[in-house]
Image (cartoon, rainbow, N blue to C red):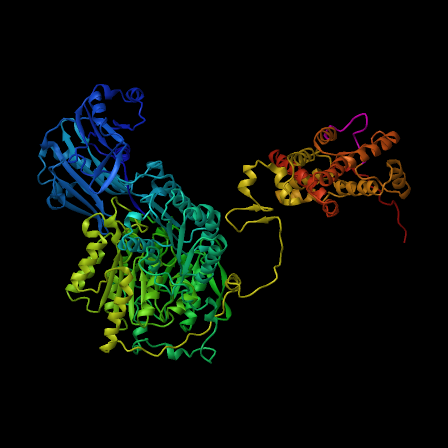
Amino acid sequence: MSAKAISEQTGKEFLYKHICTSAAVQNRFRYANVTSETDWDRLTQDHPWLLTERLVVKPDQLIKCRGKLGLVGVDLDLVGVQEWLKPRLMRETTVAKAKGILKNFLIEPFVAHTQEEEFYICIYATREGDHVLFHHEGGVDVGDVDAKAQRLLVGVDDKLSEDSVKEQLFMHVPDDKKEVLVSFVVGLFNLYEDLYFTYLEINPLVVNQDGVFVLDMAAKIDATADYICKAKWGDVEFPPPFGREAYPEEAYIADLDAKSGASLKLTILNPLGRIWTMVAGGGASVVYSDTICDLGGVDELANYGEYSGAPSEQQTYDYAKTILSLMTREKHHEGGHLLSMSIHTFYHAVAIKDYQGPLKENGVTIFVRRGGPNYQEGLRVMGEVGKTTGIPIYVFGTETHMTAIVGMALGHQPIPNQPPVAAHTANFLLNSSTNAATPASTRTASFSEPRAANDATSAKKPKAGVPAGNESKATMLFSRNTKAIMWGMQTRAVQGMLDFDYVCSRDEPSVAAMVYPFTGDHKQKFYWGHKEILIPVYKNMADAMKKHPEVDVLISFASLRSAFDSTMETMQYSQIHTIAIIAEGIPEAQTRKLIKRADENGITIIGPATHNNPCLTSITPLCFNQIGNTGGMLDNILASNLYRPGSVAYVSRSGGMSNELNNIVSHATDGVYEGVAIGGDRYPGSTFMDHVLRYQDTPGVKMIVMLGEIGGTEEYKICQGIKEGRITKPVVCWCIGTCATMFSSEVQFGHAGACANQAFETAVAKNQALRDAGAFVPKSFDELGDVIRTVYDELVANGTIVPAQEVPPPTVPMDYSWARELGLIRKPASFMTSICDERGQELIYAGMPITEVFKEEMGLGGVLGLLWFQRRLPRYACQFIEMCLMVTADHGPAVSGAHNTIVCARAGKDLISSLTSGLLTIGDRFGGALDAAAKQFSKAFDSGMLPMEFVNKMKKDGKLIMGIGHRVKSINNPDMRVQILKDFVKGHFPATPMLDYALDVEKITTSKKPNLILNVDGFIGVAFVDLLRMCGGFTRDEADEFVEIGALNGIFVLGRSMGFIGHYLDQKRLKQGLYRHPWDDISYVLPEHMSM
């Protein structure tokens, strides 16, 4: 959502900090906040003026008309304020239909003034610009300001001038106050713009001889502008509407939403309710809430929420887990219901498994209705979860009406024993025709009537050499020749568009090029039917436009931060006449600038899409393809007959609901001619009326369907168009959000524009107005398909629509990844792994989630045990591994590995190259003796050789004993690293037979030569054998196998890598130059004379 209400304290803080005006704004920052936990002594220390001035106290909880409700204490001293608060603080009160606890109050200095010194001012945003309302009489009894106030519209990109304020707003303002007020109003408007307010009301605004006083203030800001205004806003808290508590779970989901490019929303309406919803899509979530309320479940509806815009697996799991945790917190004797209309049922299934105990204990029944990509597999997974957990889970696909599960859950209709099974996803591979491909000529005509030869090419074409500006918009946005540029590396969306093109029998792909600023110019590979093609990718828009003059559509997947600039750049090119913007969270002020520029240039904008849902754009069968993923995956498109045009055109706010409309229209009529989802923002780039008028003027469209929603007034323009006769084709309409009037507190639905600020913006009011105007309006969303069918049948009966014979589309191969996910094919894996799995909700090491690794404080040794040995090793074993890494980390710059690393570093090589150079020296002569020592000592010990026999045999064979001997250390100068390890091993290992054997060998070798000690490599090698054999975690064969495959040398490699990196960084830090070995350290032994 975008426009969010802020507290009065926050609004005044913004004003006092950032307003720029010559007017003397008084009482800056003079306010004190009071809650039930307030320490009054501390409060008076922080605000000493509380002890000396007369005061005003009022609740600061988004309550309107506080004065009329008796919720303002005026002209009190501090004791009077405390007495006034006693019967109110933490007490329940009723405001309109909302009951809530008064828990947050604001104390300010009392300003004595007369009625003549009170004024009213309000600034609010609309599509056309910002309205400034001013009335020379303010205060509690200001009345209907919409009717009484002077009004001034400041257009998008225009500035408010002092002259316009004086001339249009201050007709009744006393002359002695005009200059002060003008400066304040202009400064206030500039503040409103700079801090991205969407609503700002001050009543009363007091102006007297001392200056300007802001007494009461209400405001909303555009929350999507946080990335722009963060420095000025700081951390803003958005309080819930009065009557609804703020829950930590809501804050948690809001935090997930803020960190994601997707949309995740949760509002808890009644934590004791029995009906919980978990719905994918901003529009669908509203439809479910409407249906629940229509069927009498409003008192049991526990939450409103939605997720959309492709959240990650982890986000989907976290969202589902939060809902399940909430719904199982309170036990209901009657049981509970979870209604799920979702896309990510795979991750819901995991969450349900995790909560199966509480769900069964609470008697929860789960109803799932799913469409969209891969829905059959998702339903199968959910069905299996129900069988394995014993939780009653009923699953339904697109064969079941979207909201039918609500009636089943509430007992209004029976639950089918075995719902009909829709055609399998893979069926689109097989063409029912005997021909390999359907002749294109049989599918180039409209499905309902012959298409004129020029009908498909009537879209606006650019005129060479004519700059963009003040052009009329095209009636037809897309044709069979339409070409598009995709902004963003959205390969999946492009492939979906190409597949759609192919089944529509287009001659060429509709995507001509892609623009992606973060890579150089290159080509990207895609499929066109059965063969592979290359589509160019450009680094900048100018190159793409220059090389593809035939392109007239831009599909922008730019992020919210870059969408504005990239779209403004695109509108410089006269060849573009349609732009689809997918980005979530573009600030409304920027969107309005885009709309203004588009109107000037004759460009149609579809979007922005508030929820970053790649469905939110357009689909035109036959002519132009789906934009992004509109219509779902290819099986959905074919099931809804979207590969050929029908007679029905629709326009919707919701992209997710456009899939449902495709399904409904295809079942009730001959199919879709064109469908557009304009997006859920308050100010979509194009409106319902824009598209309905296009449909009215398009011969192939015989009837129109519009799915509106709560909030805004665009639907009233449809009413006016019908009444005036501008719209003559049958229009079937329904506005979702009828449940809003049944809630006791305001609910902001998933779409940014889905909130009624006035009674006439409610869905109920708009549905009635559409019905009165002559549109076909059902009684509920459930009846929408029936009404569409009735209107269609009448058009068929009177000959307006002549259904054509159905023609099958050509076959399109299924992608390998999709076929594998569905279990239709199998292939041997190229790799196998048994130590790590990153695919699920969190990283797993050898079966242990990463959160548990940290929770158990396993440390580096524990992680190494999991990844190398697939075991959770005892604590002493983990400590020993970490000690080994510490003692092997480095042994000075003179050893061969460190020397090589240093030489490489000084030659200017990078870290990886220098480290590799050092590691390549590790072998039997340097550092690689761990494995060899372990093998030699193990073989001798296991064969029963006495230590003396082992020494004598190695001498007889002419072999060195690995792990024995040191160049510097000796029996008289022991290696402290070995001593440290020995003390630990002897004190913690359960038994050390191999170490004892090696120490006996050391006694023999040091008697011959004092430096033939058991060195650190040898010690670690034999001690590790003891660890593997004696810790109880491995069989003898497993322990021997780890020694045989070289696991022990890994200890030295890992440890010494730390030292090598240290030497590399040291040389770089010291800025050492290229190394050249000195001549005097090289013995040149070339022959003096060589005869032939």
Q: Relative to residue 873, is residue 788 depicted above or below? A: below
Q: Position of residue 964 (x, y in %)?
A: 81, 36
Looking at the magenta stretch, what is its main secondary structure?
loop
Q: Is residue 859 left or right of residue 840?
A: right
Residue 239, by quadrant, is top left
Q: Is residue 821 magenta?
A: no
Residue 530 versus residue 79: which sits nearer the camera?
Answer: 79
* Residue 86: x %, y % from top left: 23, 26
Determine whether 1079 is above or below 526 in the image: above
Q: Is residue 769 left or right of residue 468?
A: left
Q: Residue furthest bottom?
A: 434
**Magenta segment: does it hold 965?**
yes
Question: Where residue 392 sits: x, y (%)?
Answer: 43, 55
Q: Is residue 895 visible?
A: yes
Quadrant (top left/top right/bottom left/bottom right) for the C terminus: bottom right
**Numbered circles on residues, count:** 0
Q: Pick the residue in front: 852 or 677.
A: 852
- In the rendered structure, the answer to whether residue 111 lies left or right of residue 157 reads left
The quadrant in which residue 117 appears is top left
What's the magenta region? 964-977
Query: Which residue is pictured at 86% across the width and 36% down the height?
Result: 947
Between residues 69 and 292, which one lies in front from this camera angle? 292
Instruction: Residue 449 in the image: state x and y as whole percent.
Output: 29, 77
| 966, 918: nearer the viewer | 966
